[in-house]
Amino acid sequence: MKWMIASDIHGSAYYCEKMLGRYKEEKAKRLILLGDLLYHGPRNDLPKDYAPKKVIEMLNANSESLLCVRGNCEAEVDQMVLNFPVMADYALLSFGKQVIFITHGHIYNTENLPPIKNSDVLLHGHTHIRIMENKGDYFYVNPGSVSLPKENQVNSYAIFDDGIFTTKDLDGNVLETLDISL
């Protein structure tokens, strides 16, 4: 099953629309969002075309395809306007004998590991920095940020298909890949 993974939209209607366009072009089965959907947060500048109400409308129109976890900028009031669950701190997906631990990254991260086993995957956003690594005991994947990348990175997302994570820019160009299959 092909999944598209994105994080940190932060209320940008411009980048949300671009992300949803890539989702349709990728023909992925699910769109996994790693939190920070609507609010830009006090540490971030306003993203391009900051319009949370437009983002709500676009995401609600795709609610049947979304799997989301709560970011540090989500609040109960966000859940009241969204037609899909966004308040879970994490989700677990299985890939063969491996578990993919999906979270935002503000609670569980490389400094505070969740209960994962050898060869499992820690998948989170939050840092706005794209990275994919085999850490030896586990795999770490961060798709970067759709709207506010940091450290001179480009706006990005990830695809997971048949055991391979691939990060791409919002034009669909491949940035890097990581094979987690055993």
Image (cartoon, grey):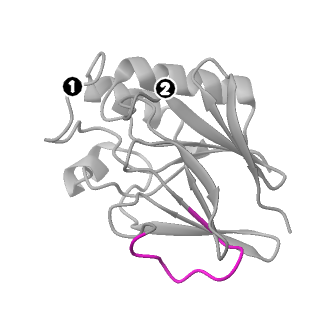
Residue 117 magenta-highlighted: yes
Which residue matches tag 2?
A: 154
Residue 23 position in % (x across, y down) = 64, 30
Provide the secondary structure element on which disc 1 rests.
loop
Name the side, left or right, on which 40 lies relative to 126: left
Which residue matches tag 1?
A: 46
Residue 159 in which image quadrant: top right
Q: Nearer the viewer, residue 4 or 51?
A: 4
Q: Nearer the viewer, residue 159 or 65?
A: 159
Residue 105 position in % (x across, y down) = 40, 60
Residue 143 in which image quadrant: top right
Query: Which residue corresponds to the image point at 30% horizontal and 31% vertical from the top-left?
Result: 11
Residue 145 in which image quadrant: top left
Name the side, left or right, on which 125 lies relative to 39: right
Question: What kind of secondary structure does the magenta stretch mostly adopt?
Answer: loop
Q: Amino acid at mark 2?
A: Val
Magenta part of the protein: which range? 111-122
Residue 141 position in % (x across, y down) = 58, 54
